[in-house]
Image: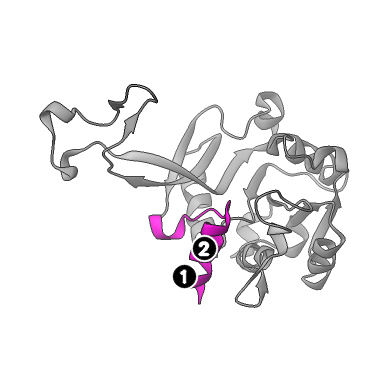
Amino acid sequence: MKKDYNNFVCIIPARKGSKRIKNKNIVKINHKPLIEYTLDASIKVFPLKNIFVSTNDKKIIDIAKKYNINFIRRPNSLCKDNTSSEKSILHAIKTIETNRKIQHIVFLQVTSPLRSSNDIIRCICEYKNKKLDSIFSAYKVKRFIWTGKKKISSLTFDYKKRQRSQNLKDLIIENGAIFIFNLKKFLKAKNRIFGKFDYFEMEEEKSFDIDELKDLKLVRKLLN
């Protein structure tokens, strides 16, 4: 299975610290550091030589070593709260490209621990079968959504002619779990979503992105 993905490189960003949750990327969920859920999923898909953790955290480097996974020492200047993921990807690519030729990047964020190896494989298959330049994971919902501050308005429906929820249009919610893109075209676009793109549908219950303490508490219950 892993032979099919030799021209795919998996990049996992995991910088030190965080504002809302202290040391979020290594916070324990059921006695297991958060990052290990993503590492466990990735090693079932890719050869170890094709997986790279980008970090400035010694503890995360030690975890990568335990898994025999490559690590990239990311400078602190690229580990600030306002540093875009694209900048960390570009830094990782420059390091990786000195050692091998790669065609596609799979970008996995640590904060999506419910994403499985099968989700990654299915997303790659969709990316390849549709001959896409980029793809992102998402889930679909139907919601009665309002917007505004002083004066609010119904965004996804007409409140004067309320429909049944079944008849609402699907909303596509990006969940941050998986991004895949063509390397050469990414270097031009400097954006993870570009060109001919589409979304890969995941289940809503697997799409939790840990950003705040309430998310962490909920995922702990789900993984218990």
For residue 36, say whether it is visible: yes
Instruction: Kindly indicate the quadrant of the structure image that contains residue 76.
Output: top right
Which quadrant of the rendered structure holds the N terminus?
A: bottom right
Residue extending farthest left: 161
Q: Nearer the viewer, residue 60 or 133?
A: 60
- Mark 2 is surrounded, within 10 Å at the Cα level, by few (under 14), some (14 to 19) or many (20 or more) other residues, namely some
Q: Position of residue 130 (x, y in %)?
A: 45, 40
Residue in the image at 68% along x and 65% along y: 27
**Residue receiving disc 1:** 222
Which scheme is used to colour this image of the protein?
Answer: one colour
Residue in the image at 65% along x and 78% along y: 31
* Magenta segment: 203-224
Residue extending farthest front: 150
Do residues under tags 2 and 1 come within 8 Å of each other at their CB atoms?
Answer: yes
Q: Position of residue 19 (x, y in %)?
A: 70, 48
Q: Earlier in the sequence, mark 2 or mark 1?
A: 2
**Residue receiving disc 2:** 114
Q: Nearer the viewer, residue 90 or 96?
A: 90
- Relative to 181, is 38 above or below? below
Under tag 2, what secondary structure?
Answer: loop
Which amino acid type is marked by label 1? Leu
- Secondary structure mostly seen in the magenta stretch: helix
Residue 212 on the magenta segment: yes
Which amino acid type is marked by label 2? Leu
Under tag 1, what secondary structure?
Answer: helix
Instruction: Kindly indicate the quadrant of the structure image that contains residue 29.
Output: bottom right
For residue 203, say whether it is visible: no
Q: Is residue 123 left or right of residue 110?
A: left
Viewer-side label of 2, 1: 1
Residue in the image at 34% along x and 38% along y: 171
- Mark 1 is surrounded, within 10 Å at the Cα level, by few (under 14), some (14 to 19) or many (20 or more) other residues, namely few
